[in-house]
Amino acid sequence: MKEIILINLSGPDKPGVTSSVTALLAKHNVNILDIGQAVIHNALALGILAEFSDADSWPALKEVLFRANELGLQSRFSPVAPESYQDWVADKGKDRHIITLLSRRITAEHIARVSSIIAEFELNIDSINRLSGRVGIEEAKALEKSCVELSVRGDADNLTDLKAKFLEISAELELDIAVQKDDMYRRTRRLVCFDMDSTLIEAEVIDELAKEAGVGDQVSEITELAMQGEIDFDESFRRRVSLLKGLDESVLAAVADRLKLTEGAEQLLKMLNTLGYKTAILSGGFTYFAKHLQKKLNIDYVHANELDIQDGKVTGEVTGTIVNGERKAELLKEIAEREGIVLDQVIAVGDGANDLPMLSVAGLGVAFRAKPLVRKSAKHAISNLGLDAILYLIGMRDRDEHQ
């Protein structure tokens, strides 16, 4: 009669532990039903779910016990009933999700509050992995970043309620929490579409131009209303552009030169280009500045508004179709179709209400440092880290960037 035994070994990590133990099991024709290993600060935890074809498993386990003692490891052997094993196998059909925690530093309270909610929704944590680099014990740096990824399993019928719970604690704990279905699309994203103003760059370009034109307060007030979704984007855009009438064309170059990239933007685009992603700027701002960023960051596509200039002066009009929220979503779909990319493989990133249409059609829509309305409506939000935190959402580790 076959036996199933769970073998747990723990102790100081050293080369050759796994090979030494499994070599002993191999002598007894043992089948490995499951295996997992983790090392935290040179402390090893190794688990092997082993099926023994021999009637008596003790000779093999005795050899493992002696070898473990030689290696300075603690060992524990737990019989697994066939019914229990079959129940475990049946669990493989349950939904799997990845929950990503993003903050400057991950604390015990973060893990406790998040895992409590996970338990409340009767989901089981299968594994926890750190994606960010090793953290020093000195005082946290201003731009430090931490990320922990939890793989959870269980029926997620009330996923909307789960995300709502996470959103409630997110601001309180200064913690971003993303929940994604663990499927092939998460690992095969191919296109990233960015808003420009307050996303790739820290400023709203039209506000910067307005300051130069002496109408900064008027334009900022209209901009804020539009970002909050309180007035129609097209109307607000025309009103703001009209206030720029008479601005000298030379001002555009001066403003472009002083635009500051958002934290993590350069690192993110560098990695996306290295990985062969297609990238796009879909902006309700102006083409002049979008093309400036396209050259700087090596971006594939640019769609924005063309500011009308005649005789070296801004006329207060734009030419062509205004790139509003609906147009951004259309452009995202067009680029994806042109590149042969399904929408589930698209990432969209933006901060304003006019970004919500493209965030909703993309497989991974990220509200970046967004207003509360946008953060609540988007599938995912990043408020505490820079743009390069998006790399964590596609499963990349910090060490991957240095390979």
Image (cartoon, rainbow, N blue to C red):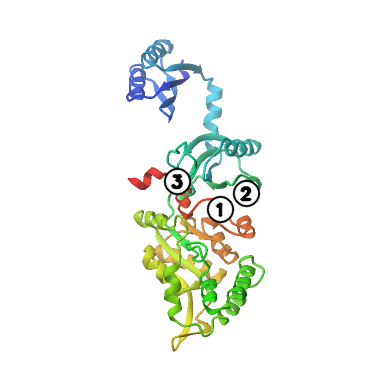
Marks 3 and 1: in contact by CB < 8 Å? no
> Could you tell me how many numbered marks the image carries?
3
Judge whether 220 appears above or below 32 on screen. Answer: below
> In front of the other: label 3 or label 2?
2
Label 1 SS: loop
Looking at the image, residue 42 sits to the left or right of residue 95; the answer is left
* Quadrant holding the C terminus: top left
Residue 308 screen position, x and y as percent: 48, 83
> In front of the other: label 1 or label 3?
1
Looking at the image, residue 235 sits to the left or right of residue 390; the answer is right
Residue 193 screen position, x and y as percent: 47, 62
Tell me the tag on residue 395. 3
Residue 388 screen position, x and y as percent: 45, 53
Q: Nearer the viewer, residue 126 or 89?
A: 126
Tell me which corner region of the image, top left, top right, bottom left or bottom right, holds residue 227. bottom right
Comes first in the chain, label 3 or label 2: 2
Q: Nearer the viewer, residue 152 or 95?
A: 152
Tell me the tag on residue 265. none
Tell me the tag on residue 383. 1
Identify residue for label 2.
Answer: 171
What amino acid type should be assigned to the residue bearing mark 2?
A: Ala
Distance between the alpha carbons at the discs numbered 1 and 2: 9 Å
